[in-house]
Amino acid sequence: MKTKAAVVNAVNDNYKFESLDLNKVGTNQVLVKMVASGVCQSDETFRIGKSEFPLPTVLGHEGAGIIQEVGSGVKNFEVGDQVVMAYDYCGHCSSCRTGYPSLCDHYNEFNVSDGPGQSGEYKFHNEDGTIVHDLQAQGAFSTYTVTNENNLIKVDKDADLRKLGPLGCGFLTGFGTITNSLKPETSSSIAIFGTGTVGLSALMTAVIEGCYPIIAVDIHDSRLEIAKELGATHLINSKNENLVERIDEISNGLGVNYSVDTTGVPEVIESSITVLAIGGESAPVAMTGSKTQINTTQELLLGARKIHGVKMGNAVPQLAIPKLIEYFKNGRFPFDKLLGFYRFEEINEAAADSSSGETIKPIIIIDEEYRKENPIEYKNQ
């Protein structure tokens, strides 16, 4: 069948709409009619060439849609199910079987390589038969896609898919970094560097976990105000203040128990470790091609501090995403305050607004007929 997709053909190219051939559904796959997808900074990292990725490609890995067809081996989904998509994993290696599918032995092969992934077939081709790659076995920037059963999380029929896509990556990463990796004790202190999607989701989770103080660090006052609205107890604009001195003041000279860096800026990562208390723990979670220098004796050994490597929040999407939806319904994880909606044809503008910080979490509406009786407000409306 044919699908309309936003394709990146060369490094730093804009998205270009093309009609692609889409493979038939395989044994353990489903056909999804896409409703919406978040635009993630990882998409931009690959598009502009900060991290290498095979081209041409259909990016998009925060997808949400409705199942149109299921393969003969699919057991837990049926036509008409509303689904959110996350990353793919094998389900059989030691990491998968011990509850860490984000550390799957085949993660890179299935999600970010130039190979065909778990299905063994490339799903997208252009009119002359050229392979068009996809990201995280999704390729969500398309009107239809074929994905694997392991990518899927079923959500209720009454859930609004236009809002839920980012739960599969950005919000999952911030939430899981707190709950699965750092695991802060109630009343422990935390500093969060960068108040974008991942940082603010980590912040909202720190509120749920009862952290205090919760210090938000950024260079944009507008974002810091959102952080305050979401529960930050202290704000630091590191462009105007010395963040190390300010955190020292807030913590009465002790430092913070935990820190999360979402900026990927080497100097900021180093600061996120410097401000730790004795026994403190830090999680740098941003994708970055830059190298960071730290004195392991001074920063880690003498203070018995720890640095956590965290991938996709070390989360099991099928467990974490339903929990996030419940928190959202109960007003405890109000991620909708971060969303800005764009029509599919406005994907290049959405990408630009994501990079500039104009919109914290852009959402591309791919199916404008979905819930048309309950219209949403677009950024350019």
Image: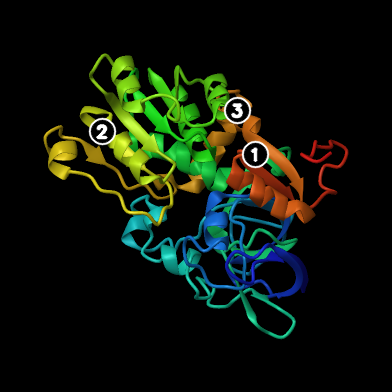
Cα separation between marks 3 and 2: 31 Å
Mark closest to the chain's N terminus, 3 or 1: 3
Q: Which residue is mark 3?
A: 334
Q: Which residue is mark 2?
A: 274
Specify how the rendered protein is coloured.
Answer: rainbow
Asked whether 63 or 316 is in front, the reply is 63
Q: Going 31% across and 24% down the picture, which residue do you hit?
A: 185
Asked whether 301 or 352 is in front, the reply is 352
Q: Please identify the residue farthest to the front as the structure is shown.
A: 240
Q: Which residue is mark 1?
A: 359
Asked whether 48 or 153 is in front, the reply is 48
- What amino acid type should be assigned to the residue bearing mark 2? Thr
Asked whether residue 188 is in view, the answer is no
Q: Position of residue 254 (x, y in %)?
A: 23, 19
Q: Secondary structure at mark 2?
A: helix
Left or right? Give the position of 285 relative to 112.
left
Q: Going 88% across and 38% down the picture, which residue do you hit?
A: 373
Q: Are marks 3 and 2 in contact (CB under 8 Å)?
A: no
Left or right? Give the position of 90 relative to 303.
right
- What amino acid type should be assigned to the residue bearing mark 1? Thr
Left or right? Give the position of 158 relative to 253.
right
Q: Secondary structure at mark 3?
A: loop
Left or right? Give the position of 304 relative to 80.
left
Q: Position of residue 338 (x, y in %)?
A: 62, 33
Q: Going 57% across and 68% down the picture, which residue do you hit?
A: 11
- What amino acid type should be assigned to the residue bearing mark 3? Pro
Mark closest to the chain's N terminus, 1 or 2: 2
Which quadrant of the structure image shows residue 61? bottom right
Q: Which numbered tag is attached to residue 155? A: none
